[in-house]
Image (cartoon, rainbow, N blue to C red):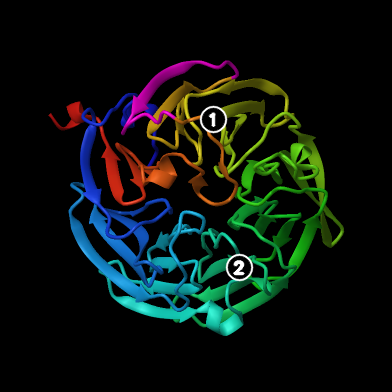
Amino acid sequence: SVVNETSVPLRWSATENIAWTAPIVGYGQSSPVIWNDRVYVTSVEGPKKETCRVSAFQLADGKSVWSETVPSSFPVLSTEYVSRAAPTPAADANGLFAFFESGDLAAFSHDGKKLWGRCLGKDYGELQSNHGLAASPALTASAVIVLVDHGGPSYLAAFGKADGKLVWKTDRTSRQSWSSPALIRVGDAEHLVVSSNGSVDGYDPADGALLWTFTDVSGNTSCTPRALGDGMLVIGASGGREGRTANAAKSNMALRIVRKGDKFEAEAAWTAEDATSSFGSPVVHKGLVYFVNRFGVVYCLDAKTGEKKYAQRTKQSIWATPVGIGDRVYLFGKDGTTTVLASGPEFSVLAENPLFGESEDAAEPEAEGTGRREGGRAARGGPIQYGVALVPGALLIRAGDKLYCVRDSSASK
C-alpha cells in the first residue's frame, strides 16, 4: 500500500493529531516496526540492562497486546554512553526478530510465542565496545542476518528464521561501528551491503561470500547504505565529534557497482564533500538525496550527479533518519520538533511540529556514537525522537520510553 502526503498529517503537536500514546516498559533507542495491525518495539530494563524486552501494541489504539522478555547474557551498566536496545527489530510473515547489544538474538511469533533464541556473545565472543552495538538485522526469504562489528572478532552471520541455526558466517576486520547491513539490488541480484568504519563491502546474501569492497572511505560508522537505483548506492559518514576523522568529508558519497566479467567492482560515482551525516542515514526521495547531521543541518543533493541544491540548518539536532512522503520530507529533531520540508531542490519549510518541549541547549554537541549530549537534555533524561515507522494514515514516533501515533484526527470524524 502506498503512503502519500495526504495520508499523514502535515502538522501536529502534543495535543493535535495525536491518535494515541503508549508507555514502553524500560528504555530503548530502536525504531518501532509495524506488521499488519501490530506495532513492535524493543527495550532494556535494569541498572545493568539485565532484561531485554519485546512489546507489541495494537496499531489502531495503542493498547498492549503482549510483552515478552529475554534475560541479558552479558549485563553491563546502563548509562547514556552505551547503546540501550539500539538495534531495530525486523518483522515479516514468519515473525519478529529482535537483536540486542548483549548479543542476544531471538525470534517471536506474532502472537508473542518465543520461537527460538541464542546468544552470539557466548557463541563467538563477548562484545568489546565502549558504546555498544546498534546494527539492526536484515531479512532474506529464509534467514535473519546480523552484523557484529566491534573491538573483538567481528563478523557478518546469517541464521535460519525457522530454528535460529547458523546458515553462514563471514569474518570481518575488527572495528567500532553502529551501522546496519542493507539488501540492495545490483542488476538482477541482491547484494548485502555493509558500510562500516573503513570500508563498504558487498556480500552474497545466500552464502556470505565477499563480492566487492571499497576502502577509500572513513567515518562511516553509523549510516545504513541506501539504494539509488541502477546499481548505485549512497553512504553517509561523520568526521566525529571534533571533525578529526580523516577523509570523512569525502566519504558522504555515491558508489556505482559494476560487473566486470564474473566479478564486481565498486567505484565512486560522486562525492558530496560539503555534506556530513551523523546518526541518521541518508534518505533518497524523488531524485534527491538528503543528508542530516547532529547540528540540525540538512543537505539536499541531486541523486544522479551529487550536485548540491542547498544546505540549511533546522531548529534541532537530528538523530533519526528522515522520511520522504510524496511532496514532503520529514526531519525528526532530537528534542521533539519535526520539521517538514517541501521535497525538491529549494529549501522550503512547510511546518514545524513540537511533539514535546523545546530544548534550551539545542546547540550543545553530543558525544559521537553514544546517543547522548553532554550536559544536555539527554543527560537530564529528557525525551528524544529516536526513530519512526510509517503506514498509510499513521506515523509512529518512538521516544525512549514512549510511543506516539500521529494520525489526522479529522479522518476519524
Residue 134 relative to residue 64: left or right: right
* Residue situated furthest front in the rendering: 375
Q: Residue 91 or 294: which is nearer the viewer?
A: 294
Residue ID for mark 2: 148
Q: Residue 373 or 262: which is nearer the viewer?
A: 373
Q: Amino acid at mark 1?
A: Gly
Question: For the stretch drawn in magenta, what is the main secondary structure?
Answer: loop
Magenta segment range?
345-360
Residue positioned 56% across, 67% down in the render: 146
Residue 17: percent from left, percent from top:
24, 30
Residue 302 occupies quadrant: top right
Residue 232 appears anywhere in the view: yes
Residue 221: percent from left, percent from top:
65, 52
Residue 407 occupies quadrant: top left
Residue ID for mark 1: 296
Q: Is residue 131 above or below residue 253?
A: below
> Under tag 1, what secondary structure?
loop
Residue 269: percent from left, percent from top:
79, 38
Residue positioned 20% across, 47% down in the render: 60
Residue 42 relative to residue 17: left or right: right
Residue 158: percent from left, percent from top:
58, 73
> Under tag 2, what secondary structure?
strand
